[in-house]
Amino acid sequence: MTKPKLWTKNFFIVSTANFFLYFTFYLLMVTITNFASEKFHATPSAAGLASGIFVIGMLIGRLFTGRSIDKTGWKKTLYIGFIFFLITTGLYFFVNNMTTLLINRFLNGAAMGIASTATGTIAAKIIPNERRGEGTGYYALSVVLAAAIGPFLSMFLSQYTEVSINFVLCILLLAFSLIAIFFLNVPIIQFTKEQLEEMKGFSLDHFFEVKAIPISVMGAFIGLGYSSILTFLSSYTNEIDLVGVGSFFFIVYAVLVLVSRPFTGRWFDVRGENFVMYPSFFVFALALFVLSQAHHGFTLLLAGAFVGLGYGTLTSSGQAISIKVSPKERMGLATSTWFIFFDGGMGIGPSILGFIVPSLGYRGLYMTMAIVLFACLFFYYLLHGRKAGNKIQQMVQPS
């Protein structure tokens, strides 16, 4: 039996558009703190707020997009998100004080939330059910590559050019993506009168897909764990005198994701999500433990490799599970629910974990997060794993 085709024109376009979307996000995330400090002489806390308020806007954008995307239309929502993101990115040239910068960062984040929810929802519909794990894994590579290349290029450009060059590059990439999605064919979803009636009014299930909440809760812990790396790795490597080697941490991470993704995606589809999720939680916890014990460059890069295998697999597989357990007509809400929890963990992580560093230090921080991620093995079992196990057993039982 031949497998349904995955690498279609539509899948390639939506993955490419998502790559440039997140590439822009990471370019701006790295740049904006220095921009606020240099142009407006912002304090470190105010400059950090300029970076963090983007995440708040993104969460709100996801929250309302998840509710409205099915009714508004997937491609129309995609256009709205990219145009809004393009406009607010262009407005960085016109901000003249910290207040307007914060407002624009918030709006820029909301636009990112709208656009990324649309790309994720469309990708989920395009990917064949028989190749859900594999397809979601390949789609998630667009984020992984952006997370590896974006910060590197942003730091490189900041050394030799002005910040405005980053803004110009972001505008060009978003404009190219906007042109590309014009050629994207998006399936039209037809709703019954009952489904349209359910979309009216105000209730919790209009903003969240309830069936996706258990796995999305795990997404919040995954995001929390990764935020400890994004936020404090630079300071940690400086403290242990491994700054030079530390610059290759995310490169090793990206390489391991690229190498492992074809296998983990196939295993998800063939052997079930538990076969992938349990080892991934263990490996991510191991990565944080190894990171806490790093004294040499090899140990630090080994931790980066484990992060690629563990965290890199958890993010794509978790998103695939959220879609798998939800009704087909609520894919948009399922995607939004997963990212709201995941981004929430990433967003509040720096503030929460910042209280740990003064008392435990960076090594203590990563040891603590290793324990938390190891405990997630049991949380995952309670929230989703035992149910998934039962389904697999039913599938293999003879009729």
Image (cartoon, helix red, strand yellow):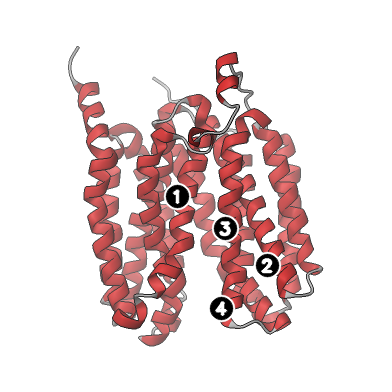
Report the amino acid beneath label 4: Ser
Sort mark 4 into few (<14), some (14-19) or many (20+) by Cα contacts within 10 Å.
Answer: few
Report the amino acid beneath label 2: Leu
Where does residue 225 sit, x and y in percent of width and height?
37, 62
Sort mark 1 into few (<14), some (14-19) or many (20+) by Cα contacts within 10 Å.
Answer: many
What label sits on residue 341 in the rendered view? 1
Q: Quadrant of the N terminus?
A: top left
Left or right of 40, for residue 130? left
Q: Residue at x 64, y 52 (%)?
A: 110
Which residue is tagged 4? 45
What label sits on residue 102 in the rendered view? 2
Q: Residue at x 47, y 55 (%)?
A: 344
Q: Is residue 23 above or below residue 66?
A: below
| Cα distance between the residues tagged 4 and 2 | 13 Å
Report the amino acid beneath label 3: Ile
First of labels 2, 3 by sequence position? 3
Q: Residue at x 49, y 56 (%)?
A: 144
| Cα distance between the residues tagged 4 and 1 | 25 Å
